[in-house]
Amino acid sequence: MAINDAVLLFALIFALYRVGDVWSFQVVLFPLWAKVGPAEFPAYHRSHFHRIFGVIFVPMALSALSSVLLWLFPPAGARSWLIYAGLGLQGVLFASLFYWIPLQTRIEREGNTAPLMRQLVTTHWTRVLNITAFAVVVLTLVALRLTTSPR
């Protein structure tokens, strides 16, 4: 397998994984936070954060790495604008952490109040759309690769 194809497969695996995790957070996990009592919520949130490190943050870093690897080793048939779109989406996603981490810290400190939960779910949609868009970019690169003979 050529390095370009291996990189594309790597990117596809983590792009699709991230779509699954971000959508499950948006439609399952965050709405369930309202079921955790105010007294229990800070401990719950701390435990939640520590437990998700390996299943959320490691794949997030690997997905970001895949966008750089796609730039370094573009697959056959790739359009440069798709490669740059993928890099841009990952850059925006990481920049959003400057907003997202303080919001999570505030939620842990103040609890799962209705205004904070609305803010969380509303702003998280930008992350859902970003991660989904990156997966579309990677899937498009896969489609282009499958219709292009190898170099």
Image: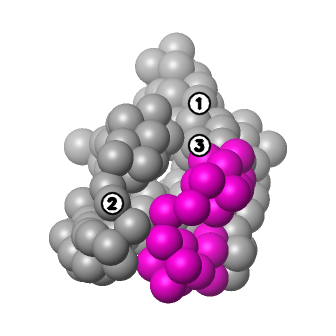
Q: Nearer the viewer, mark 2 or mark 1?
A: 2
Residue at image location 68% in from the left, 81% down from the top:
98
Farthest-out residue, top: 147
Label 3, label 2: how many angstroms apart (C-alpha)?
26 Å
Q: Amino acid at mark 2?
A: Gly
Question: Under tag 1, what secondary structure?
Answer: helix
60 relative to 76, above or below: below
Asked if residue 87 can be seen in this view, the reply is no
Could you say which disc has been placed on residue 37 in the image? 2
Q: Which residue is mark 1?
A: 136
Residue 93, how many percent across, how many down? Answer: 64, 62
Question: Under tag 2, what secondary structure?
Answer: loop
**150 in the magenta segment:** no
Q: Which residue is mark 3?
A: 128
Label 2, label 1: how many angstroms apart (C-alpha)?
38 Å
Q: Nearer the viewer, mark 3 or mark 1?
A: 3
Residue at image location 54% in from the left, 79% down from the top:
110
Quadrant containing the N terminus is top left
Find the magenta span and give its range.
Answer: 100-124
Label 3, label 1: how many angstroms apart (C-alpha)?
12 Å
Residue at image location 49% in from the left, 63% down from the top:
112
65 relative to 24, above or below: below
**Disc 3 residue crowd, few under 14, some 14–19, many 20+, Cα 10 Å:** many
